[in-house]
Amino acid sequence: MMPHFGVILLAAGKSNRFKDREKKQFADLDGRSVWLHSLDLFSNRDDVAQILIVTDPEDEEIFDRRYRANVAFISNSKMVKGGNERADSVQNALVHIAANVEYVAVHDTARPCLTKDLIDRVFDAVQETKAAALACPVTDTLKRVDGSKSVETVSRENLWAIQTPQVFEKKLIGQAYAQRSRVTVPITDDAQLVEAIGHPVTMVESDATNIKITTKKDLLLAAAILKSRPKPKPEGFIHPFAEDRMWQ
């Protein structure tokens, strides 16, 4: 029997380092808004039973004006209000996870170069381990710095750079967030909370193309990555309002 996944798409970031009048999730990337690349990938999967799109409340008007058709076309999608921090946004979304969902995937829409193959791999892994995340082994030499001066070379052995999606058994991520207050350091991802309740998270090797857009330079790199890939052939019925540009 096919497992049922619920996907939390985080599109509520403030984009403080993007330095543009428009937030990075709304920026144009290869003819589509950044966040729509993630929506497209997950909405075309038969094993995805639900998609929760988490947005900043101050962006409600933008989403309604630009993306109403995109969201309405996906019957299993729902808009959720984000919180002050990333963890607040995920916790808000968890309340809306459907009863038939077995696994919950959390993905930052600032990673628009995700591929179907990477999703397949992390989705397969979580069914065996209950907690899995895309990541890459660290290959660069790492330095601990004081001000602008290097004070120590840090061993990169056993160090991985974490990415998204991160995927968990529904009960497990629910338990992790229920005990969130016990974590006294800044929460930077969901795997951190799952680790805090004693459950290891399996690292599923990804690649460097699953980049996170933080600055405008990252947007240029993401565009080059997408343009280097073969364009998928359309399958089935194409909705006449599929392009968000029609609402801009």
Image (cartoon, grey):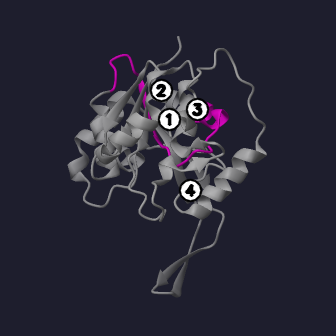
Q: Give the mark, 4 or 1, whose residue is nearer the N terminus.
A: 4
The residue under label 1 is 247
Q: Give the mark, 2 or 4, whose residue is nearer the N terminus.
A: 2
Residue at 49%, 44% (x, y): give it.
109
Q: CA distance from mark 3 to mark 4?
A: 36 Å
Is 209 or 56 nearer to us in this picture? 56
Residue at 48%, 62% (x, y): give it.
20
Amino acid type at circle 1 is: Trp
Q: Which residues are magenta?
A: 97-122
Residue 157 location, quadrant: bottom right
The residue under label 2 is 69
Amino acid type at circle 2 is: Ala
From the top left corner, tell me how far across and down residue 148 is, in percent.
50, 87
The residue under label 3 is 243
Amino acid type at circle 4 is: Trp
The residue under label 4 is 160
112 drawn magenta: yes
Are discs 1 and 2 less than 8 Å apart at CB? yes
Residue 89 location, quadrant: top left
Is 55 or 27 nearer to us in this picture? 27
